[in-house]
Image: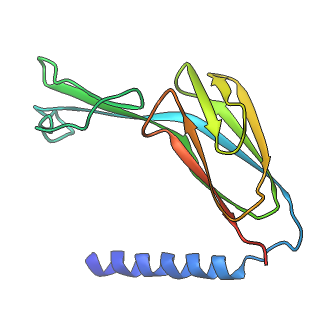
Amino acid sequence: MFFARKLMSLAYFFIAIASFVCVAVPASAEVRDFYIVTVHYDGKTNAKGDATHKPEPFPAKPFESGQGMWVKGPEANGDWAVRAFVFDPSHVTVMQGDDVRLHFVGIHGGSHQISVEGVENPVTVKRGTTMTVSFKAAKPGIVTFVCTDHPPSMRGQVVVLARN
């Protein structure tokens, strides 16, 4: 089993390298659209366990809860839970000179104020709506976007690669 997992990992690595090497870089700038959803991941468990899960004790030192992620519990019956708000995808890649349109889609959470580095006005996306932020990827580097309502976990990056 160990050997099979290692072999699969190696195969995925070579596929990733091959796909990276074989991608043709467009000679001119393109319009790049990305749909980025606002979601949260939930983890629920019980310190006593149940028929399908082993017991999971409440952490002795849980991470610090805040607006973007929290730990709650344990309850009298042993239940406890964690949540983290995130963007999905949280990283996208474009080429220098591309026109970038980030379409933020509200799925989880009532409201998210989103700031994109280098863009003057933040947008607020509510559940069931889409707000778009557009910019030109003028220089290579990283452009960060964050939800100021749900730090520290709700953040992402646009990676801008140099166009040769």
Q: Nearer the viewer, residue 105 or 52?
A: 105
Q: Residue furthest right?
A: 28
Question: Residue 101 appears in which quarter of the rendering?
Answer: top right
Residue drawn at (17%, 35%) of the image: 51
The quadrant in which the N terminus is found is bottom left
Residue 91: x percent and y percent?
58, 54
Q: Is residue 50 left or right of residue 71?
A: left
Q: In the rendered view, how is the structure colored?
A: rainbow
Which image quarter holds the C terminus? bottom right
Report x, y in % for residue 149.
50, 26
Is the residue 43 above or below the residue 25 in the image? above
Q: Residue at x 10, y 38 (%)?
A: 60
Q: Please state if 47 lies on the left or on the right of 18 as rendered.
A: left
Residue shown at the point (12%, 32%) measured from the top left: 47
Please state the horizontal and vertical placement of residue 108, each as a whole percent of the image. Answer: 53, 27
Is residue 99 depicted above or below 3 in this figure? above
Q: Nearer the viewer, residue 22 or 66?
A: 66
Residue 141 x, y percent position in the rendering: 64, 62
- Determine which quarter of the picture holds residue 23: bottom right
Q: Residue shown at 40%/26% (left/top)?
A: 67
The number of callouts visible is 0
Residue 126, above or below 163: above
